[in-house]
Amino acid sequence: MTMPGYRTYAPPAPPKRSGMARTVLILGIAGLAGLALCLVGILPALAGLILGTISLLRGDTERGLAVAGMICSAIALILGSLALSWLLSKAAQCGDASRYPTDTARRSCVEREFPYAHATPAP
């Protein structure tokens, strides 16, 4: 009950938090970290870029987190695309029949260009 002429005090509501902006940041960081695992980071980076765009268009309150996540996602996509194109160009060189006419020559090219790749024996 309040006295006449006085208003009751209502504390301000806590600020709304945006779960989507945090998700964008997490996906961007996961995209950067996932590049070390055979370019798996491209998928979360792509999802982070899409969700970041949605978050910014909706006008979420945590705009800085969404922007930081989109920057991480964009960096992961650029680095992943460069690495993928480099690997594919090396593989295409080894698959060139005019440069390496025999199967043995192509295998030696693959072993020379990709020393970390090991053939697994067939069961």
Image (cartoon, rainbow, N blue to C red):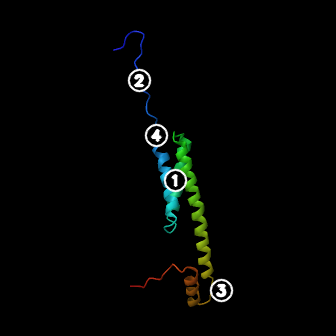
Indicate the amino acid at tag 2: Ala
From the image, tell me which residue sits under label 4: 17
Q: Tag 4, which secondary structure?
A: loop
Indicate the amino acid at tag 4: Arg
From the image, tell me which residue sits under label 3: 99
Question: Disc 2 versus disc 1: distance between alpha carbons?
Answer: 38 Å
Q: Is residue 9 left or right of residue 89?
A: left
> Which one is earlier in the sequence, the residue at label 4 or at label 1?
4
Residue 90 in the image: state x and y as whole percent: 61, 77
Residue 36 lies, with reference to residue 56, above or below; the image says below
From the image, tell me which residue sits under label 2: 10
Q: Residue at x 59, y 64 (%)?
A: 81
Residue 117 lies, with reference to residue 23, above or below; the image says below
Q: State which quadrant residue 98 falls in.
A: bottom right
> Which one is earlier in the sequence, the residue at label 1 or at label 3?
1
Residue 40 in the image: state x and y as whole percent: 49, 65
Question: Disc 1 versus disc 3: distance between alpha carbons?
Answer: 41 Å
Residue 3 lies, with reference to residue 113, above or below; the image says above
> Which one is earlier in the sequence, the residue at label 2 or at label 1?
2
Residue 46 in the image: state x and y as whole percent: 53, 57
Question: Disc 2 versus disc 4: distance between alpha carbons?
Answer: 20 Å
- Circle 4 packing at 10 Å, graded few (<14), some (14-19), many (20+), is few
Indicate the amino acid at tag 1: Gly
Q: Residue furthest top?
A: 4
